[in-house]
Amino acid sequence: MAAPAAAAAAKSPPSAPAPAAADADAMDEKKRSAAKVVTSLFPRIPKVTTVLLQFYITRESNLQLDCEPLMFFCKEQVLLAAQEILDKLNKQVITYQDIRDVAENLIGLHNLAFKKSPEIAKVTGDNIRKLMIIVGELATSLEKVSEVPPTDWMGIGDTVVAKTASLNMAEVAPFYTFIPKMKDFLSMKLLGAGGFGAVYKCVYKPTNLTVSMKLVPCDKFQRHKQACIDKVCASVIGHPFLVKYYSCFASRDAYVTVMEYICGADMMRVCDKAVYLPTNECRIVMAQLILAIEHMHLRGLLHRDIKVSNMMILPGGRVKVIDFDTNKICVGHFAKRVLKGYFTKTAFEFFDGESAGTVPYMAPEILKRRPYGRACDWWSAGATFYKMMTGRVPFRGETKQELTDKIINQPLKWPKDEEHPHSATPEAKDMVFKMLKKNPVERLGSVNYADIRNHPFYAGFNWKKIVFQKGDLCDIPAIGECMVKKTDPGGGKPHLTISATSNTLKRKLVKVEEMVDIDPTSQLSLYTFSSPSFKKMINFTKTAAGPVTVQPSMFKSTGPESETLDYKKASDVDVKAGIRSLTGASTDKSITAKEKMDIIMWRTKSLGKFWSFGITVVDVVGENNKKFYMIEKVKSGSPAEVSHVLEGDVLVAVNNQDISELPIAEVKRRMQDCGDQLVITVLSSSAFRLLESRRDWDEILKAAGQDTIQVRAIKTACSGSGYYGFKVFEAKAWNEQKKALVHCHVIQKATDVQVVTPNKAMYPGDVLVMIDGAPTDSLDAVGIKAALAKGANELSITIAPMSPLRLKRPSYTRLHETVMTDANVPEPSTKANIDNAAAGAKPAAGAPAAGAKPGAA
């Protein structure tokens, strides 16, 4: 009986998936398809976002030499974020989670900048806010199509800016006041010479501090980005396994870098001396290299020249990775939780075809000049691992071309036992082979850096202990042997690193004693760096009465500056709230604050002057004679039209400055004199904006209520009969009950209206609901004109009093998700009841954006 039962069980259909799993799959599908839905139904939104992103990237990509290295880094990170959104938007694969992750990551970047320099954090916050303004409408649309609660994107930008807005910035000494003089350095000996320059052991005489000094001739770098990258790197990193930079500046003939002096040996020489390292020692050395690379990657830096000769090892086994001249800024990971989008770019992030590094350690994709990413550093780390285990690089060739062909095409082989008696453990070999996968997508670390830590080769390994452990980590006798002082090292020839070329010896080395200082005020900020400890030391020497001694411990760090990323922490699948939890820090909790929408515009310069933004602003009088500024006209094809400024928008701020108390001439002057960029703040509650929210128009009108007023006809020579002093704007709005588009007529102008009904008024932004008791939702512009042309002396009209010029009106947040009403307070921004009934109204999938047809009444 058991067999038939088993057969029946085998034939029975599989059980249905769990409801939770099915719901998750449905949500994922909505999220993935949202971009195509938004592009299909509302093409204006992605089109405007694309144009603005292109403007922003082009404008901010200009390199400024008076920009500090950290400022340059933060600016590049925001640009990379903008480029990532633009690329995904163009491919129609952008999701709301992508933008949430970008925003969360940039907030982490802002926190990092805030710890290092509040002044730089302030500028970075402004740049993040601009990006949130640009992508906010797109992100909200993606969220609504995906049926998830929308995020207050402008609130995120405001929150970031608010963090530094209230700070009283202390006066900071100019960067050049911390530049030491070359005459204060005493050269002790040449440590090495390579392709870029020479490194010397020196003593800074005012404090008797032993340092390493790197001199690179100024003509070695052809591009500013290449010349400044090591300073940028120094301003961001902070890890015990990375060499510490003290100061960077320029002399007349060379770029000068003052670093910590590492009393150790070049790992290349140690490997040559020992032939190979035992497995346990390899494990400890590689762990330090892995942590150093991981720290650089998470901080947004690609090393691109990982190799044994760029590693210094101290007696006791501590490693320091050196040489940041070939680094490149990549997307960093600054959020506290794991962002999946970050690791999808590990294999492919750059498509520029750049090639940097040392050929025996270069990844195949770099040699083929194909797209590459952070995975190229893991290849180089794998080649370094192979070198330490075997004493040779994984691929060898007589010529550069032969070596390149082997790296690209030849399979990796482990040395034969007769050639290399020491056989590594299977786990070690497996890790090397996985790090040297030719396809970067398959390479160890490309999916998640936790895969490297969790490899069987590191089973039971304590990653935290190796960072904070005091004392020796391992015993490698070859280190001490390499550090033994010889009577005639190299026959009087300078020690050359592996990056040295045949021309290195032919070229005269730059020397410390030959360096000539330049005027400190002529130093370029981008090429200058001073660590906080070095600044403290310089200030100390200025106030000291005589020579002082500073111990190297003053510059020591016990661990990495930032917390290690917890790869087990919730990713975007597990966190439902996402970035939304980061909003709400603004001190202004009023409804008007929630109504404010920022719009960013750019204009071009031609013939020595800027062209207009294309908007005409007029002052209008609202309820209780309160003054407002309104956009009267938007020029076709202008920057304002590109950024989707609407006629009828109520203007409340220019470049984040309130304009309510300013005369209109001053408002226009500020808009004209703002350069190529303008940010205006408008109210989202205007009917012109609500028509584009794709909500049920009937619900909106119910929330607004109705006022019936009598208006008197105005007799003029040119207007004829049927003119009542107001102008109507026609659009189409969605009616959920009728499941159809209905006509909507918004009061666009109301300058000459004569209202007979006591204590009643009409304002631009009110909605015309009925004429003499007849509904207007079935009338087009011609029908409205005919209804008004009857020529009656007085006309009864019904309006929905929802103009932003009114003190008592329904107020909508910029997300258009909540209706707020309060008839008992003079200003709805001070207090309001929240009516959630209207929040449940869902827009129909086919409701298009409003189309405008103005008509006179």
Image (tube, rainbow, N blue to C red):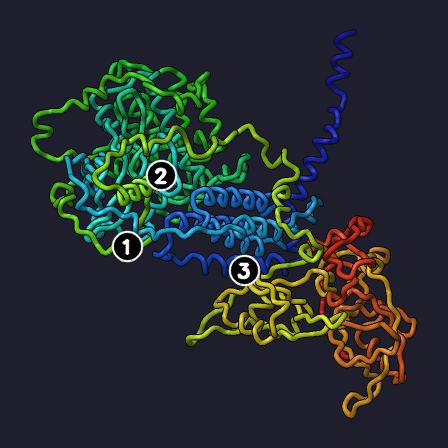
Query: Tag 1, which secondary structure?
Result: loop
Q: Which corner quadrant holds the C terminus?
A: bottom right
Residue 523 numbered tag:
1
Res 432 → quadrant? top left
Q: Give the distance between the C-alpha atoms of the residues marked 1 and 2, in whole angstroms.
A: 26 Å
Residue 6 numbered tag:
none
Query: Tag 2, which secondary structure?
Result: loop
Residue 303 numbered tag:
2
Image coordinates for residue 484, horizontal then vertical, percent: 16, 22
Residue 52 numbered tag:
3
Mark 1 touches mark 2? (CB < 8 Å):
no
Amino acid type of the residue tagged 3 in the rendering: Leu
Amino acid type of the residue tagged 1 in the rendering: Gln
Q: Earlier in the sequence, mark 2 or mark 3?
A: 3
Image coordinates for residue 18, horizontal then vertical, percent: 73, 28
The extreme front residue here reads 545
Mark 2 touches mark 3? (CB < 8 Å):
no
Amino acid type of the residue tagged 2 in the rendering: His
* Relative to 197, 808 lies left or right: right
Examine the rendered structure and indicate whether residue 258 appears above or below residue 665. above
Q: Earlier in the sequence, mark 3 or mark 1?
A: 3
Examine the rendered structure and indicate whether residue 200 appears above or below residue 384. below
